Image: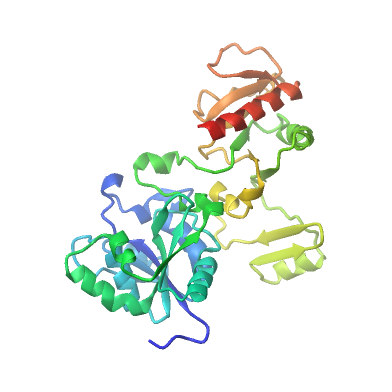
Amino acid sequence: MTKSTYPTVTGVILAGGEARRMGGNDKGLINFVHQPLIAHVINHIAPQVEKLLINANRNIERYQQFGYSVISDSLSGFQGPLAGMLAGMQAATTDYILTVPCDSPAPSPKLRQRMLETLLRTGNKVAVATDGKRIQPVFALLDCELAEDLQKYLASGERKIDRWFAQQAMVEVDFSDQSDSFTNFNHPEDVRFPALQSSVPLLGIAAFSGTGKTTLLTQLIPKLRSAGLRLAVIKHAHHLFDIDQPGKDSYRIREAGANQVIVASRRLLALMQTSDVEQSEPLLSDCLTRLNLHELDLILVEGFKQESIPKLELHRASVGKPLLFPEDPNIIAIATDSDLLVKPKMPVLNLNDLDSILDFINNFIRQYHHD
C-alpha cells in the first residue's frame, strides 16, 4: 500500500473475545452508565479516526446496530487480540489501524495523535501505549503493511501478542499522564462498582443537596493552596449549563455546531465539549484525561456518586437527610455538625472546624501515596 500524503487511520474496536472472566457475557454489550460498554468506546474513538470497524465473533447483528461495519476473525475459536488485529488490517483501506478494547470505556482523546506522531517521528511500524508502569498491548497503532507478517505468525500457531510485537519495529508511547484511560472491566463486579485508579489522590465530597458542598470547597481551597498543594476540582452537573454567556463569540460558535471550542487567553484556557449522546452520563475517567496530572497533588470531586473513589461525607442535621455511609462503602470519613446516633468505624470530623478537615485531607494524601 502506498502511504497517503496525510496518513489515514481506521479505528478497530476489539470485541471478539470469549470473556471467560466475565462469565462468558459479551463484554462490549454489557451496560455501564446507561449504555453498552462499546458505545462509550465508540464515542471516544470515532472522532479520532477516518473510519471505524468493530471486530466481533458473536452477536453480529447487535453490533451492527451501532452503525459501523462489523468484521470477524478469519481464525475460528476465539484466537485472541492478534486475530482481531489481523482482521482489522485486512479490512482497512487506510495506512494504519488503531486498536482499542471494548471493555475500556474511556480511551484517551489524544490516543491517535500521540501514537501517530510517535510513529512518524521514529519511522517504526508499531506503536504501543504504556501507562508508565507497563505496556497496554491492545492499545496499539499498527502499519497495515504488517498484515502478511502477522498472518504468517498466526499460521505458525503463535498467539502471544508481546512476542509478535518484539519481532517488529516497535516503539512505546507514554500515557502515564492519562493512566486512567486504560481502566477496564474483567469481572461482573467491576462494572457495578468500577474502582478508579489514579496517580493523583482523588477525594470525593459526598452529601445531599443543601448540605453546603460548594461552600465548604470555597473555604477549603484557599487553605489547601496556602499549604502548598496544587489541586483540581471536578464537579458533576445534573442539568444543562453554560460557562459562557449567550451572545459571546465562543457561545455563538458552539451553538453553530462546533463540538469542541477552546477559549484561550494569557491567564485562562477553557474547553467546552458537547455530546450527541444526551442520555450518557459523564464518566469521572473522561474528566481525568483532560487534566495535567503531573502538575497536581490532589483532585477533589463533587458529585459522581456512583464512582468508586474515597469520599468524605458531609452531614448536616438541619437538612433532615439520612447518613450516606451505610450504603456507600467508599466513604472513609464523615464531617458533621451534630452527634451521630450510629458510631461509624471511621473518622468523624467537626464540619465547622476547617483545620480538622484540612488535617484529615493532608493525612489522606500521605496515606494515598504510602499505599
The residue nearer to you, when weighing 3 against 13, is 3
Q: Is residue 59 visible?
A: no
Q: Is residue 113 visible?
A: yes
Name the residue rendered at 42%, 52% in the picture.
Answer: 134
User: Where is 252 relative to 212, above or below?
Assistant: below
User: Where is 14 relative to 296, above or below?
Assistant: below
User: Where is 227 relative to 257, above or below?
Assistant: above
Q: Position of residue 195 (x, y in %)?
A: 47, 40
* Quadrant position of the N terminus in the picture: bottom left
Instruction: Count every numbered label the image shows and give the total.
Output: 0
Q: Residue 369 vs residue 246: left or right? A: left
The residue nearer to you, when weighing 348 against 25, is 348
Q: Position of residue 205 (x, y in %)?
A: 64, 34
Q: Residue 106 vs residue 323: left or right? A: left
Q: Residue 226 vs residue 168: left or right? A: right
Name the residue rendered at 61%, 35% in the picture.
Answer: 203
The residue nearer to you, when weighing 32 against 181, is 181
Color theme of the render: rainbow
Q: Position of residue 187 (x, y in %)?
A: 34, 43
Q: Position of residue 157 (x, y in %)?
A: 17, 65
The residue nearer to you, when weighing 330 against 210, is 330
Name the residue rendered at 38%, 39% in the picture.
Answer: 189
Q: Residue 148 vs residue 264: left or right? A: left
User: Where is 78 relative to 34, above or below?
Assistant: below
